[in-house]
Image (tube, rainbow, N blue to C red):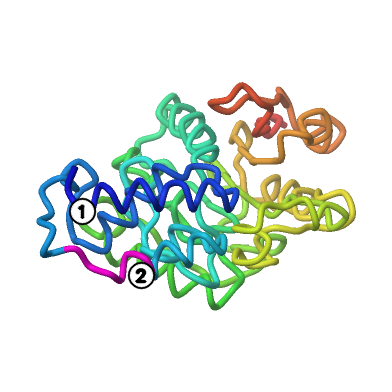
Amino acid sequence: MNLLLAEVAQATQRLADAGVPSPRNDAEELAAYVHGVKRGELHTVKNADFDARYWEAVARREAREPLQHITGLAYFRYLELRVGPGVFVPRPETESVVDWAIAAVRAMDVVEPLVVDLCAGSGAIALAMAQEVPRSRVHAVELSEDALVFTRENVRRTESAGGSRVTVHQGDARTALPELTGQVDLVVSNPPYIPLTEWEYVAPEARDHDPDLALFSGEDGLDTIRGIERTAHRLLRPGGIVVVEHADTQGGQVPWIFSEEAGWADAADHPDLNNRPRFATARKALP
């Protein structure tokens, strides 16, 4: 075993003892980042090339700083995104939300689908939609100036792979894009949805490093989703679709927000990759 692999084994134990959920993965990712190689190439790093800054990175992760803040990168579907303090780090659970949204847009008989991503954060959802639905036009709405730095940077970095069809707006999801009223084919969002009462139970990586604006939304966690329901109904054309992520404990609540009385049809909940309730969908009722 070469020196780096031996150090990775020690780092894995340290991260496990600190309660990091994926200690081996993170120890290897940090080693690859510090040494400028891929994870599968760690064994090629010569003993003389071992970089002691690896242990600085491990100490940061041991203190539960997000891996993505240390490396500055997050991976989402086919995207490599810049992230850091001030922007929500995209999670794997959201990939199932985007899967469903992409399939729904592809099934529409629309040449150039118009999509709106509310609470866009890093731009992960907006860019995935633009990249995987090649003729779509996507509008990404984000309120936070700190997050918008990353949204715009990620759009710029992916211009050749769909980013050129993403328009970024600073704005409130509850009042966004009045100029698109009644024209949008699909509204998608990963909004804040954690109840304020659950603060102490949130993982340190999120609670201490993700912006509060992207995490918490009222006493029951549903305040922003209620606002998005009204915005989506205003933006969508009749027959258009809304897709909203929520906590796995809110599966019985969110579809009721998109009620027939409020002008919706076919409201339903859907599981994520771990078969937990993860997102709700509804169709704007025809007149």
Residue 224 placed where, x, y %? 76, 55
- The numbered disc on residue 229 is none
Say which label, 2 or 1, has the lower sequence index.
1
Which residue sits at x=55%, y=43%?
21
Q: Residue 261, percent across and down?
A: 87, 33
Q: Relative to residue 22, is residue 116 depicted above or below?
A: below
Using the rendered view, name the quadrant where residue 176 is placed. Answer: bottom right
* Discs 2, 1 touching: Cβ within 8 Å: no
Mark identifier at residue 153: 2
Specify few, some or many for label 1: CA neighbours under 10 Å numbering under 14, 14-19, or 20 or more.
some
Closest to the observer, 220 or 60: 60
Between 78 and 186, the one nearer to me in the picture = 78
Which disc number belongs to residue 3? 1
- Whether the magenta-drawn stretch holds residue 53 is answered as yes
Residue 57 on the magenta span: no
Residue type at mark 2 is: Glu
Say above or below: 52 vs 271. Answer: below
Q: CA gap, disc 2 to disc 1?
A: 37 Å
Name the secondary structure under disc 1. Answer: helix
Q: Quadrant of residue 167?
A: bottom left
- The residues colored magenta run 50-55
- State left or right for residue 36 relative to residue 130: left
Quadrant that contains the N terminus: top left
Image location (x, y in percent) of residue 75: 37, 49
Which residue is at 29% across, 56% downward? 31
Image label count = 2
Q: Is residue 145 above or below residue 205?
A: below
Is 100 displayed left or right of 155 in the figure? right
Q: Nearer the viewer, mark 2 or mark 1?
A: 1
**33 or 258, which is in the foreground?**
33
Query: x%, y% of residue 7?
Result: 31, 53
